[in-house]
């Protein structure tokens, strides 16, 4: 799949094919060609099935048939999931509305999912994870408390990670518990793991800040070290608080790897969002985030909205072909990142690779110009 | 820690733990500016205006060209007349209709808290205390400090002849100190407040209320500018007149100057129903945005503002009954709807335009937070009546497109020079009658 000619002879590569194909095996050009064809069809479907999406195209005079590059697919600002019903399938087909608690407003994002989209997301995540942990199910250790996986809760970055990654688990253990509103070590579970799990293959997930500020701090005090046959540690979430504490990513990975008796290359930071469920962008051993076959990332200049060059920071746009129940094809996030390169990461994965930099700074109306509202 | 960039006429960066040294120096040197005649100060400032426009390092900064215009001798004299009624009150005691003589005396040290949204704001704040012969300590935003320092360096080198004597701008500059410190540091803020005989505050609601609440001398005068909001209104007759196109072009410039971040920047435009639909008006507005000079068209947009523009564009693109015209990049955005309300400022040349049945409908939207309104009404009597109603409700300035940012005194409903002096009297007669 690395020769362009092969692709030209295979114009009907489907989403299913892209999920089954070894992830990160397509070059950027190959992928763009395949995705553009699929996305254009999906855009027509989205436009025909949601009046807001129809407005979105009409008001911008965008003729879907004339789109010749994935850069020209109009991205929808991620905040719109808070304000609009963006379902692109009949209401009776929606099996679940994913609600994600926001960090910038109190309104949750609402992501409508039908059976097909849900299934695609599960398969997609499976396919991504298999590249990092193999195809066998493992014991899943969650560095959080059990209540975080309460299905009645709205999705937060923490719950999304736990629920998403649990698809590979054969058994889940929660390493923390909640007591009087505080997170503390779940010692009965930890003791069980310390005794008799040496031959098990496990994978771990936790929210970056909780791993550091709660789990690591307490586990160091108790001098606990785990031992497993193989362990892969995934973590996600903001670095802002850790940066404030002058904890670098490298130091974090080294320290956490020590706790689990493994090498720091088995500690994976990933980036993802509820609005693009099923897709996570996992760090490789060179700390670059890679993009799976069924997705693409465009970093857009914050002044011009044009795609940025390598190393130029801009807003991260995440494209996905997983959904036919809402507009997932191009979502403009509120995160800043930058492309590191294309097709040439030393880890061998093809396609674009990027890094997350920060959340978009919130606007402050500064100075003597202000709101019209009287307090 | 206080960073001081100018003290005792020396442009050197020093740090201080408190304001003792700074305030003592400014207080001692303010005698020099006090002994300058107002006419001399005006001549020095006029010469300064002519000088800074030739300085390539700052004359491209937004608002610097306007400083030159503002510093014209006739403008400065007019401002003093309007604020002091009679400039000679500042030279000596002068007879009045009452049984006393009247004189204006400076308040002492004026401490300035300057917001960062307008690059030249430090200068316009400072000029008021110079024209009232006060000493000044200016807390300038770090990003704009170079501009005010450059202007003051020019003033430091200026000399004028007056009545056979030579006067130097150094006598003004030595009465000024430029500082910066973390506004969140309560001790520094409190110390700054406590050396003030007058506080001039430019900022949003939070800044104004926190600076106002700081401990201060009992006699301290507080002059607050902001937080304010501005918008525009056009009546049918005006829209259908020959003046309309020019007014729209000027409005586009008003929006572009300071990238819509000033308190005088229009955020919403209301158009009375006319033979042009609101969509046609939006198309006209679009063409005037596109014709803006490059320096206005491609202004830097902070990340947060860019994000707000992206989101409001998204809302208007998805919503059924709203319209939008926009540039491919984030340069300008026209948001069209018919809801009779003011909108939260987005900034970055993001203008809301709305069609209304009657211009008087907007009167109910006016509060004391409205600083300026461009009022485009052809009939002078109707315009005057509208102005009376609008200003009664709270607007401070009724202006025309193209003039909304003119720094007229009064500003925000205040004649600042008048409040920057103490009005003192001298009763005549050796014994009482």
Image (spheres, rainbow, N blue to C red):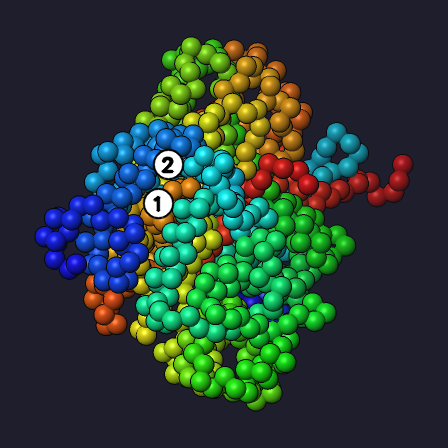
Kindly identify the residue that appears in the image at 48 percent across and 76 percent down: A247
* Residue A332: image location, x then y, percent: 39, 48
Kindly identify the residue that appears in the image at 65 percent across and 31 percent down: B367
Quarter holding the C terminus of chain A is: top right
Question: Looking at the rendering, which quadrant does residue A144 occupy?
Answer: bottom right
Residue assigned mark 2: A46
Question: As drawn, which residue projects farthest toward the right?
Answer: B433
Please say if the residues under marks 1 and 2 sit with CB atoms less than 8 Å apart: yes
Question: Looking at the rendering, which quadrant does residue A122 occupy?
Answer: bottom left
- Under tag 1, what secondary structure? loop
Mark on residue A353? none
Q: Label 2: chain?
A: A
Residue assigned mark 1: A329
Kindly identify the residue that appears in the image at 47 percent across and 31 percent down: B319
Quarter holding the N terminus of chain A is: bottom left
Instruction: Categorize mark 2 by other alpha carbons within 10 Å: few (<14), some (14-19), many (20+).
Output: many
Question: As drawn, which residue projects farthest toward the left?
Answer: A5
Q: Is residue B339 above or below residue A105?
A: above
* Residue B173: image location, x then y, percent: 50, 57
Residue B154 seen anywhere in this rendered image of the structure: no
Instruction: Categorize mark 1 by other alpha carbons within 10 Å: few (<14), some (14-19), many (20+).
Output: many
- Say which of A12 and A359 sits in front: A12
């Amino acid at each position: 799949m690395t020769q362009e000619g092969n692709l030209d002879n295979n114009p009907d590569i489907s989403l299913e094919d892209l999920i089954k194909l070894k992830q990160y095996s397509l070059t950027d050009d190959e992928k763009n060609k395949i995705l553009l064809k699929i996305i254009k069809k999906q855009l027509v479907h989205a436009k025909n099935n949601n009046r807001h999406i129809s407005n979105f195209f009409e008001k911008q005079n965008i003729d879907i048939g004339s789109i010749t590059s994935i850069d020209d697919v109009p991205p929808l600002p991620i905040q719109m999931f808070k304000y609009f019903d963006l379902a692109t399938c009949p209401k009776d087909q929606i099996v679940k509305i994913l609600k994600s608690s926001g960090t910038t407003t109190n309104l949750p994002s609402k992501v409508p999912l039908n059976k097909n989209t849900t299934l695609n997301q599960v398969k997609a995540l499976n396919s991504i994870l298999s590249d990092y942990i193999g195809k066998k199910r493992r014991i899943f250790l969650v560095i959080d408390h059990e209540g975080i996986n309460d299905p009645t809760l709205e999705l937060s970055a923490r719950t999304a990670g736990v629920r998403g990654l649990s698809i590979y688990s054969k058994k889940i253990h929660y390493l923390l518990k909640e007591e009087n509103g505080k997170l503390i070590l779940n010692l009965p579970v930890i003791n069980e793991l310390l005794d008799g799990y040496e031959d098990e293959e496990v994978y771990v997930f936790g929210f970056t800040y909780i791993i550091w500020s709660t789990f690591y701090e307490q586990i160091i005090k108790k001098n606990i070290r785990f031992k497993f046959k193989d362990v892969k540690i995934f973590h996600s979430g903001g670095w802002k608080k850790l940066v404030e504490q002058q904890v670098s990513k490298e130091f974090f990975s080294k320290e956490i790897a020590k706790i689990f008796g493994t090498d720091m290359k088995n500690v994976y930071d990933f980036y993802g969002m509820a609005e693009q469920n099923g897709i996570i962008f996992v760090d490789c051993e060179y700390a670059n985030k890679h993009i799976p076959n069924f997705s693409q990332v465009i970093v857009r200049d914050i002044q011009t909205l044009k795609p940025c060059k390598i190393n130029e920071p801009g807003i991260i746009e995440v494209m996905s072909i997983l959904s036919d129940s809402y507009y997932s094809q191009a979502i403009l996030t509120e995160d800043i990142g930058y492309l590191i390169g294309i097709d040439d990461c030393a880890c061998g994965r093809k396609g674009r690779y990027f890094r997350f930099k920060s959340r978009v700074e919130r606007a402050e109306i500064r100075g003597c110009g202000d709101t019209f509202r009287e307090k | 820690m206080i960073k001081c960039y100018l003290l005792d006429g020396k442009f050197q960066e020093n740090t201080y733990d408190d304001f003792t040294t700074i305030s003592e120096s400014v207080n001692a040197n303010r005698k020099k500016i006090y002994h300058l005649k107002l006419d001399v100060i005006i001549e020095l400032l006029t010469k300064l205006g002519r000088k800074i426009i030739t300085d390539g390092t700052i004359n491209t900064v937004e608002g610097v060209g306007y400083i030159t215009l503002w510093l014209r001798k006739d403008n400065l004299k007019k401002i003093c007349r309007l604020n002091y009624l009679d400039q000679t009150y500042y030279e000596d005691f002068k007879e009045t209709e009452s049984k006393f003589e009247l004189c204006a005396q400076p308040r002492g040290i004026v401490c300035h808290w300057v917001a960062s949204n307008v690059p030249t704001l430090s200068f316009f704040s400072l000029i008021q205390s110079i024209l009232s012969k006060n000493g000044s300590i200016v807390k300038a935003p770090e990003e704009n400090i170079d501009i005010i320092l450059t202007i003051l360096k020019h003033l430091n080198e200026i000399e004028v002849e007056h009545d056979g004597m030579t006067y130097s701008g150094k006598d003004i500059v030595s009465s000024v100190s430029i500082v910066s410190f973390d506004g969140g540091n309560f001790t520094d803020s409190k110390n700054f407040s406590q050396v003030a005989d007058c506080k001039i505050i430019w900022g949003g609601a939070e800044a104004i209320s926190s600076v106002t609440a700081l401990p201060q001398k009992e006699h301290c005068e507080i002059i607050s500018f902001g937080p304010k909001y501005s918008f525009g209104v056009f009546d049918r007759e005006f829209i259908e007149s020959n003046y309309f196109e020019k007014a729209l072009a000027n409005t586009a410039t008003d929006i572009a100057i300071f990238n819509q971040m000033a308190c005088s920047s229009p955020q919403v435009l209301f158009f009375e129903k006319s033979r042009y639909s609101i969509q046609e008006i939006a198309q006209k507005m679009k063409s005037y945005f596109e014709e803006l000079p490059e320096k206005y068209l491609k202004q830097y947009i902070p990340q947060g503002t860019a994000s707000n523009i992206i989101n409001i564009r998204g809302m208007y693109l998805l919503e059924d009954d709203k319209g939008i015209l926009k540039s491919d990049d984030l340069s300008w955005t026209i948001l069209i709807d018919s809801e009779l309300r003011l909108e939260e400022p987005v900034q970055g040349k993001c203008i809301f335009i709305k069609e209304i049945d009657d211009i008087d409908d907007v009167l109910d939207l006016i509060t004391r937070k409205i600083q300026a309104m461009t009022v485009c009404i052809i009939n002078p009597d109707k315009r005057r009546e509208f102005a009376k109603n609008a200003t009664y409700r709270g607007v401070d300035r009724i202006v025309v497109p193209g003039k909304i940012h003119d720094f007229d005194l009064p500003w925000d409903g205040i004649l600042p020079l008048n409040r920057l002096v103490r009005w003192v009297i001298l009763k005549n007669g050796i014994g009482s009658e």
